[in-house]
Image (tube, grey):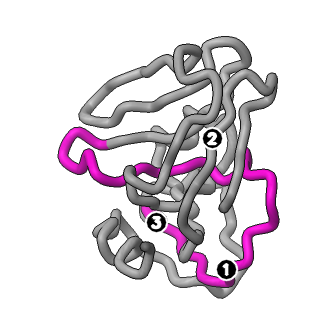
Amino acid sequence: MISGNCLCGEVVYQLNSDINTIVFCHCSRCRKQTGTAFNSSAIIKKKDFTFIKGETNVKIYAKDGVNRHFCSNCGSHIFSVRDNDRNTYRLRIGLINEPIMTENRIHIYTDSKANWDNICDGYTQYPDSINPSDLTSNNS
């Protein structure tokens, strides 16, 4: 079991599956949402995610088919859900409390990364998106 919480601790969750792959998204919307060069997430199955506390504190910002769930108290981004794929969440891994043991990492939307961003690792890069089922097929 993996646990996580927002910055203020009002939202707490558990994940009942392993994280198979870390996804670094370089699209302009993720840069705006995080205020950084990319967001770091894991694509997980909805059925494996459970709120332990604070679900009523979660607000949603929806635009262009993407629903970003965040803590209304501290603003921590918890996960996003796409209108065309309600069975998977893109969980923001910076809120996870335990070490993440996977070495599988990928970069997506690298064709739209910031011009000042230089990807300095050897992980696979995709110019656009990927199919989420390719990353969740091994999850229970």
The residue singled out by tag 2 in the image is: 13
Q: Do the residues bearing badges 2 and 1 touch, measured as CB atoms within 8 Å?
A: no
Q: Residue at x 73, y 77 (%)?
A: 101
Q: Quadrant of residue 105?
A: bottom right
Asked which secondary structure carries label 1, the reply is loop
User: Could you say where residue 13 lies in the image, as x and y percent from the top left?
Assistant: 63, 40
Q: Which quadrant: the N terminus? A: bottom right
Q: Magenta part of the protein: which range?
A: 82-110
Asked which secondary structure carries label 2, the reply is strand
Seen as rendered, the residue at the extreme left is: 84
User: Could you say where residue 49 lies in the image, as x and y percent from the top left?
Assistant: 49, 49
Q: CA distance from mark 2 to mark 3?
A: 26 Å
Q: Quadrant of residue 58?
A: top right
The residue singled out by tag 1 in the image is: 102
Q: Is residue 99 magenta?
A: yes
Asked which secondary structure carries label 3, the reply is strand
Q: Is residue 129 visible to us here?
A: yes
Question: In the image, which is nearer the foreground, mark 1 or mark 3?
Answer: 1
Front residue (pair 48, 67): 48
The mark that comes first in sequence, 1 or 3, is 1
Q: Could you tell me the amino acid type at mark 1?
A: Thr
Q: Which quadrant: the C terminus? A: bottom left
The residue singled out by tag 3 in the image is: 108
